[in-house]
Image (tube, grey):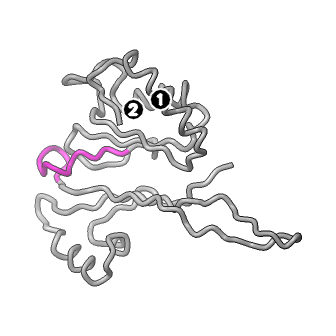
Amino acid sequence: GFSGAHSLEDHTPLLEEACRHFEAEDANLVYVLGHWNAPDLGCEPGMDVPSLVDHLRKGPCHAVASRMYYMMGHAHCNEAMPDGRGFLLGAGGAAHGSCGDWGIAYLDSRPQASPTRTSASGGFMQSHAAAQHVLAKVTLASETEDHFPPLMSCISAKRSLRSCLDGHAADIWVNSTATHG
């Protein structure tokens, strides 16, 4: 995360350090989190999340640009951005506004079990751990419906929110295996 209330110049040394870290760690996924979805109401120019991510992808984070996603708030909606890499998550605390729903995001990027096999020399080889990358919008309520009781019943029965994403007012935004290299 970062503060859009401060200038890009103020953030540059730390952003460059973070980009070097993501590259050195060989991260499968990099999420940039911030508040402002547009440069207004206290956000410095160029420090809204989409503008900053564009700057990072073209500049200090170019080595991990293809693995970058972003989340932002401010507007009281939960929706995927047209680029498929950005997600507006502002309807978690307010059910008003132009979107008419209230909900949460579900993100799961846990590594999958890596296949281990024996090499010809008898040693073990392990492949780079891939992450199952799932991001979903889970609507808890709309202006006309309360989705929370059936969702809670599902979670109680299946013991997992992820197991309840097929239905119960959930929209899967991303469902892929994140790997590179």
Which residue is found at the position 32% from the left and 81% from the top? 158
Q: Residues within 10 Å of mark 2 (few under 14, many from 20)?
A: many
Image-based side of 132 in relation to 38, left or right: right
Q: Position of residue 74 (x, y in %)?
A: 22, 37
**Furthest residue toward bottom:** 157
Q: Identify the secondary structure beneath mark 1.
A: helix
Which residue is found at the position 36% from the left and 45% from the top? 87
Q: 22 or 67: nearer the eye?
A: 22
Q: Are marks 2 and 1 in contact (CB under 8 Å)?
A: yes
Image-based side of 26 in relation to 148, left or right: right
Q: Position of residue 141 (x, y in %)?
A: 16, 62
Magenta-drawn stretch contains 94: yes
The residue tagged 2 is: 50
Q: Residues within 10 Å of mark 1 (few under 14, many from 20)?
A: some
Placement of 87 over or under 9, stated as above or below: below
Q: Position of residue 167 (x, y in %)?
A: 32, 72
Instruction: Give the magenta part as a residue range.
Output: 87-100
Image-based side of 35 in relation to 26, left or right: left
Which residue is found at the position 31% from the left and 40% from the top? 72
Which quadrant holds the N terminus? top left
Q: Position of residue 16 (x, y in %)?
A: 50, 26
Majority secondary structure of magenta residues = loop
| Res. 129 image quadrant | bottom right
The residue tagged 1 is: 54
